[in-house]
Image (spheres, coloured by chain):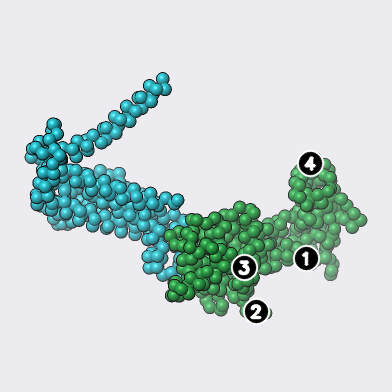
Chain colours: A cyan, B green
Amino acid sequence: MRGLMKLFSAIYALAIYGFIFLPVVVLVVFSLQSTAFPIPPFTGPSTRWYEAVMNDPRLTSALFNSLAVAIISSVVAVALGFVSAWGFARFVLPGSAVMRGLITLPLTVSYLIIGMGLLVIFNMIGLPKNLIAAGIGHVVINLPLCFAIIYSQMGDHQINIERAARDLGATEWNVLWLVTLPILWPAIFASLFLSMTFSWDEFVISFLLTRFDTTLPVEIWNLLRSGLNPKTNAVGSLVFAVSVVAAIVLELILLRRRPA
Amino acid sequence: MTEALVEMKNISHSFGRAGVLHDVSLTINPGSYTVLLGPSGSGKTTLLSILGGFLVPRKGSVLIRGHNCTMMPPAKRPTTTVFQDYALFPHMSVGNNVGFGLRMKGVVKSERDRLAHEALVIVGLPEAFKKKPHQLSGGQRQRVALARALVVKPAVLLLDEPLGALDLKLRRQMQDELKIIQKQVGTAFVHVTHDQEEAMALADHCVVMNQGRIEDEGTPERVYAKPATRFSATFMGESTIIPGEVTSVTSTAISVNTVFGSFPIIATAEEGAKVTLAIRPEHMRLIRDSRSITFGSAEVTAVVFQGSFKRVVAASKTLSGPTFIAKIPATHEVAVGDTVTPCCHIENLIMLTK
Ligand SMILES: Nc1ncnc2c1ncn2[C@@H]1O[C@H](COP(=O)(O)OP(=O)(O)O)[C@@H](O)[C@H]1O
Ligand SMILES: [Mg+2]
C-alpha cells in the first residue's frame, strides 16, 4: 500500500515537472536543429539558427530595444516604488491604508486592460505609439510590485534605525545614503530584477503600445505569423536564457540576505 | 544650587484629540540619573521623545543648558537616545556603529576608531569592535547602543525602556552596570521604565508619572517613604490603602476617622477632608505589641515564600475594609485561611491627601 502511494506520488511529480519543463526542453532542443523544420527527428546539434538570429537586424534591434525598455522602466519603477514606500512608512497620511491599497491594485488588473487604458490615454494626449509608451506601460505594471516588496521591509525597526542615525547628527541625505539604501538594497535589487524579467517577456502592453520599433516578444510574434521554424526556437531560447540568468541572480541575492 | 541642565516647562501634548501630557514640568540636573517611572500609556515615551526632539510639543518649551531647543531637530540637539530595540545599523561593524555619530561630526577615521574603542571599553565590550551586530547577544547589543550614544558626549543621554527586552537576571546585572557607567562618565541620564525595582535601584531623581501627569518626584528614598499621592504609594512599591476623613484638627495633629476607628496623625489638613492612609508591607505586622494600632481581623488569602521573607495578603473581615499586604519574617508560621490581626505602629501610617 505504502509502496503504491510512493509510486503514485513519483508519477505525479514526474507529470507535473514534465508538464512545466517539457515545452521548454523541446524549444531549446529544436533550436539546435540543423534542418529547416523544428520537428523530429533531431538533426543537430547546430548553431545555424542562432547565427540566423544574430544576422537578422530586426531581431537584434528588437533584442536591444527589449533590454533598454527592461532596464530603464525597471529603474524608474524601483525609484518610484522606493519613494512611495518611504513616504508611506514615515508619514501619517490621511487614508493611508486606502492609498496603499490603490497603489498595489494594478497587480490584480490584467495587462490587457492596463494596455488598453494606456492606449486610450496616450491617444488623447497625443503620445505616439513607440518604445517610450511601452516603457511607461511597464512602469505601470511593475511599480506596484516594487512598492510592495520595498514597503514590506520598512517596518518599525527600520524606522527606528533611521531615527537613531538622525539622532546621531545625520542629515537626511546621509540617512538615505549610509543607512536606508544599504539596509534595503536586497529588497531594491530583488524588485529591480523581478521588474526586469517581467518587462523582458511582457507581450500584450508592448504589442498595443509600439508600432515600428518594438520589443523582442512582439518581434517573435511577428516571426511566428509566418510559421514555425528553428529560428523562432533559437530566439525563444535566448529569451529564456536571459530570464534564467535573472532568476539565478535574484535567488543569489535573496539567499545571501538570510543571516547565517 | 547648580544651574539646571534641562528644563522642560509646562509641556502639553496630544495625539489627535486624546491628551497625552498635561502641563508637565521637569528639571534635570547635571550628572544626575533621572528615572521616569509609570505604567504603560502614562506618557513616558512621549515626554522622552519631546526631550530628544522626535516630537514637538503642542505647548511648552524645552531648554537645554539655557538654550530653547523646543523646535530643534534631533540631529542638532545635544541629546542622544538608546532605543529599546537598540536600532543598531545591521550592515556596519560594531566599531562603525559606535563611530557613526563622530563620522557625522566630521571626525577622521583613525580618531573615530580610537574614540569608538574607548567607548566600547567603558561598556565592557572592546573585543566586539570588528563584529557585526547580528553576531552579538541582546545584552551585548544593548552595550553597543549605549557606547554609540555616549561616544558623542551628549549633554543628556535618553534611554527608553533600555532593559525591557532582556531576561530578568541580565536586566538586574545591566542595571548595576548602567549606574556604574553613568557615574563614571558623569553624563546626565534620563531613563524610562515601568519597573519600580529598576527605578529604585537606578534613580538619583525618581519621577512617577500617571495619565500624562507627574504624580510625584524626588529621591527614590523620599518617594518610597513619603509618597505624595495614592497612586505613587501603590505604584512605587506596594501599600495597604485605608480611606478616611479628617474629623478634628489641632495645631500639631489631626484625627483621621476610618472603618477601624480614629487615628491621631501628626500632619496638617482641613477638617472634613477625604484622605487616604497607606502602610508599606514591611511595616504591616500580624503580631501586635504594646505600641500597635490594629485594623480589625482579616483572613489570609495568599502566602508567598520569598526566601528572606513571606509576602502575605489578607482580606479584611470588616465591611468595605481593605486588602492587607504584609512582608513578615520567613520564620513566622501563617497559612491561607488563618485569621490574623493586621496592625502597625502609628508612626508608619502615611497620610495621603491626593
Ligand atoms: N504616535 C502616536 N499616535 C497616537 N497616539 C499615540 C502615539 N504615541 C503614543 N500615543 C498614545 O499616547 C499615550 C502615551 O503613550 P506613551 O508616551 O508611549 O506612554 P508610555 O511610554 O508611558 O507607555 C498612549 O495612550 C498612546 O496610545
Ligand atoms: Mg513607552
Place of residue B103 in the rendered image (x, y in percent of width and height, measured from the top left): 44, 71
Eye-nearest disc, 2 or 1: 2
Place of residue A125 in the rendered image (x, y in percent of width and height, measured from the top left): 17, 57
Label 4: element kind: loop
Residue holding disc 3: B181
Mark 1 residue crowding within 10 angstroms, few (<14) / some (14–19) / many (20+): many
Query: Mark 1 and mark 3 in contact (Cβ < 8 Å)?
Result: no
Marked residue nearer the N-terminal end (1 or 4): 1
Q: Residue type at mark 4: give it.
A: Val
Residue B75 lies left or right of residue B168; in this view the side is left
Label 2: element kind: loop
Label 1: element kind: loop
Residue holding disc 2: B2
Query: Mark 1 and mark 2 in contact (Cβ < 8 Å)?
Result: no
Residue holding disc 1: B269
Q: CA distance from mark 1 to mark 4?
A: 39 Å
Eye-nearest disc, 3 or 1: 3
Q: Nearer the viewer, residue A116 or B197?
A: B197
Query: Mark 4 and mark 2 in contact (Cβ < 8 Å)?
Result: no
Q: CA distance from mark 2 to mark 3?
A: 22 Å
Q: CA distance from mark 4 to mark 3?
A: 45 Å
Q: Nearer the viewer, residue B246 or A196?
A: A196
Mark 4 residue crowding within 10 angstroms, few (<14) / some (14–19) / many (20+): some
